[in-house]
Image (cartoon, helix red, strand yellow):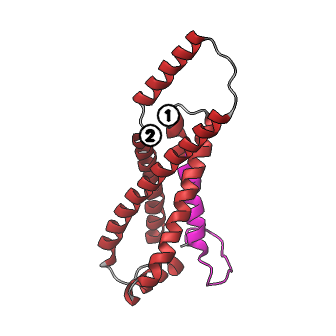
């Protein structure tokens, strides 16, 4: 998996360093893209958008690895061999695996989208609940009314689900481009 790096790593063959580095690379790519979309579409301030992007990506990443580790023991011997061959050697044994891989990638995209949406909605709910506990300073009635109208319009104009779908789509597109570049680099060499 690290064939594109010009220098050699001498690590234990048991540690799937390539997968760990690619997972970190994918997080580094996905977080800024999704933070930008959350800032632009949901009108978060920059700090909040980065916080939410980091949170939902780390939650979905951990959940994805947990699902993988729960599903992996139940795989057939041939599928386990394919997974281990890809994780440790960055190649598949059979050519017929690519259609299954496309189907799995499609499922992972929507599962990640669903989990990120639930995570963001939960974080927003918890954040709003904790803010309500703080004592509010007295604000004039006219300012409160205009503020409520502005917040209501902001919520109606943008949708959390749509924003997460766009952010997830763009981050997965960037990750797919990176994977395509890495595979084309392997084909050249």
Asked whether 30 falls inside the magenta stretch, the response is yes
**Mark 1, other Cα within 10 Å: few <14 / some 14–19 / many ≥20:** some
- Residue at (60%, 61%) from the top-left corner? 24
How many marks overall?
2
Q: CA distance from mark 2 to mark 1?
A: 7 Å
- Residue at (29%, 78%) from the top-left corner? 96
Residue 2 in view (yes/no): no
Residue 130: mark: none
* Magenta stretch bounds: 3-32
Residue 42: mark: 1
Judging from the image, what secondary structure is the residue with disc 2 in? helix
Q: Position of residue 4 (x, y in %)?
A: 55, 68
Residue 95 in view (yes/no): yes
Q: Position of residue 94 (x, y in %)?
A: 34, 83
Query: Looking at the rendering, which quadrant does residue 80 occupy?
Result: bottom left
- Residue at (41%, 36%) from the top-left corner? 159
Compared with residue 27, is residue 65 higher up or lower down, i.e. above or below?
Answer: below
Say whether disc 2 or disc 1 marks the residue closer to the N-terminus.
1
Residue in the foreground of this view, choosing between 131 and 55: 131
- Left or right: where 28 falls relative to 11: left
Q: Position of residue 61 (x, y in %)?
A: 54, 61
Compared with residue 9, is residue 29 higher up or lower down, i.e. above or below?
Answer: above
Asked whether 72 falls inside the magenta stretch, the response is no
- Left or right: where 101 falls relative to 132: left
Judging from the image, what secondary structure is the residue with disc 1 in? helix
Residue in the foreground of this view, choosing between 169 and 13: 169
- Left or right: where 93 falls relative to 45: left
Do tag 2 and tag 1 residues touch (Cβ < 8 Å)?
yes
**Mark 2, other Cα within 10 Å: few <14 / some 14–19 / many ≥20:** some
The extreme bottom residue here reads: 77
Which residue is label 2 attached to?
A: 160
């Amino acid at each position: 998996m690290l064939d594109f790096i010009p220098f050699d790593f001498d690590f234990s063959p048991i540690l799937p360093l390539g997968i760990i580095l690619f997972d970190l690379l994918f997080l580094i790519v996905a977080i800024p893209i999704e933070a930008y979309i959350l800032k632009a579409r949901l009108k978060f301030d920059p700090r909040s958008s980065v916080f939410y992007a980091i949170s939902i990506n780390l939650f979905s990443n951990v959940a994805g690895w947990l699902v993988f580790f729960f599903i992996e023991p139940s795989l057939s011997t041939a599928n386990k061999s394919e997974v281990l061959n890809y994780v440790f050697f960055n190649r598949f044994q059979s050519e017929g695996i690519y259609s299954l891989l496309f189907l799995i990638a499609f499922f992972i995209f929507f599962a990640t989208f669903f989990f990120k949406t639930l995570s963001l909605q939960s974080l927003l709910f918890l954040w709003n609940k904790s803010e309500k506990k703080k004592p509010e300073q007295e604000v004039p009635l006219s300012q409160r009314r205009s503020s409520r109208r502005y917040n209501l319009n902001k919520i109606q104009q943008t949708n959390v689900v749509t924003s997460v779908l766009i952010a997830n789509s763009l981050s997965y597109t960037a990750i797919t481009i990176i994977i395509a570049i890495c595979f084309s680099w392997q084909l050249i060499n």
